[in-house]
Amino acid sequence: MNHKVHHIAGAVIGEMALLYYHQPVVSFHTLGVLALSSLAALAPDIDKPTSVMASHQPFRFLSESMQAIGLPHRGPLHSIPFLVLLYVLLKYVADLPDLYVFSITLAYASHMFLDMFNAAGVMLLYPWKFNFKFLPSFLAVSSDGDSSGQMIIFSVLNTVFYVLIANIVLMTTSHLPIVGEALGMLHHLLQVKTMFLWEPVADFILGFINSAKKILPV
């Protein structure tokens, strides 16, 4: 997938984490989570010299170092073992709050998930060099940034992004005096009318969070 798809996917996951942990729309955590989850969703492509992140230092140095020792694109940085390592580093080494741990980890995982819609697939169990993918090559989403498949995925995620922004804003402002009741009604209406857009994404992400809590020590 291109960087626009990964970036918006990371932002959507950041929004879901903010809703899950009941964070207000205007806060230090809101800005931090959205920024870090968006970056985390781009991070696996540091192993590709032409990627957006690899074009800037210090990521360019990391990318060139990986190329020098022969690490493949969509290899170790796109693997489940590295994802688990990332979680451990965030949770136990950096000792970050759960809001950040899960938003960053899930945003990173979203990159691997989306890349499995491409024909090349992802080496999820690296160093086992088997490419996991969801679709056969003739149905796979083209890696071309202008492909119709990527444009559709981006459009859906972009719509979900703005719907969730509106939900967060209305959820926060519904507690205001005088206008709060009207905004609360509008929030409820927006949830009901747009549920078909965001509920599947929310169920998947929150289910992933709850599953991770059962499997991994938290």
Image (cartoon, rainbow, N blue to C red):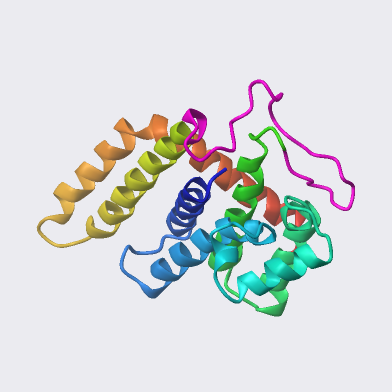
Confirm whether the magenta stretch covers residue 149: yes
**Residue 216, position as x, y percentages in the image:** 75, 59
**Magenta-span inclusion, residue 73:** no
Q: Residue furthest top?
A: 138
Bounds of the magenta segment: 121-150
Q: Residue furthest bottom?
A: 94
Residue 131 in the image, given as x and y percentages of width and height:
80, 39
The residue drawn where x is 57% and y is 40% is: 204
Q: Is residue 44 above or below residue 88?
A: above
Is 92 above or below relative to 198?
Answer: below
Left or right of 77? Residue 53 is: left
- Residue extending furthest toward the left: 178
- Say which quarter of the image contains residue 25: bottom left
Is residue 193 left or right of 110 when viewed as pictured? left
- The residue shown at (38%, 47%) is 161
Check the picture and name the quadrant holding the C terminus.
bottom right
Residue at position x 60%, y 54% from top? 106
Of residue 72 and residue 197, the one placed in the foreground of this image is 72
Note whether 176 is above or below 13 in the view shown. below
Q: Position of residue 205 (x, y in %)?
A: 56, 46
Task: Compare residues 110 and 52 and report the one nearer the observer.
Answer: 52
- Judged left or right of residue 109, residue 154 is left
Q: Is residue 95 visible?
A: yes
Prevalent SS, magenta region? loop
The residue shown at (61%, 41%) is 114
In the rendered image, residue 195, in percent from the top left (x then y), is placed at 38, 33
Residue 147 lies left or right of residue 80; in this view the side is left
- Count the numbered circles shown: 0
Q: Quadrant of the N terminus?
A: top right
Q: Is residue 218 visible?
A: no
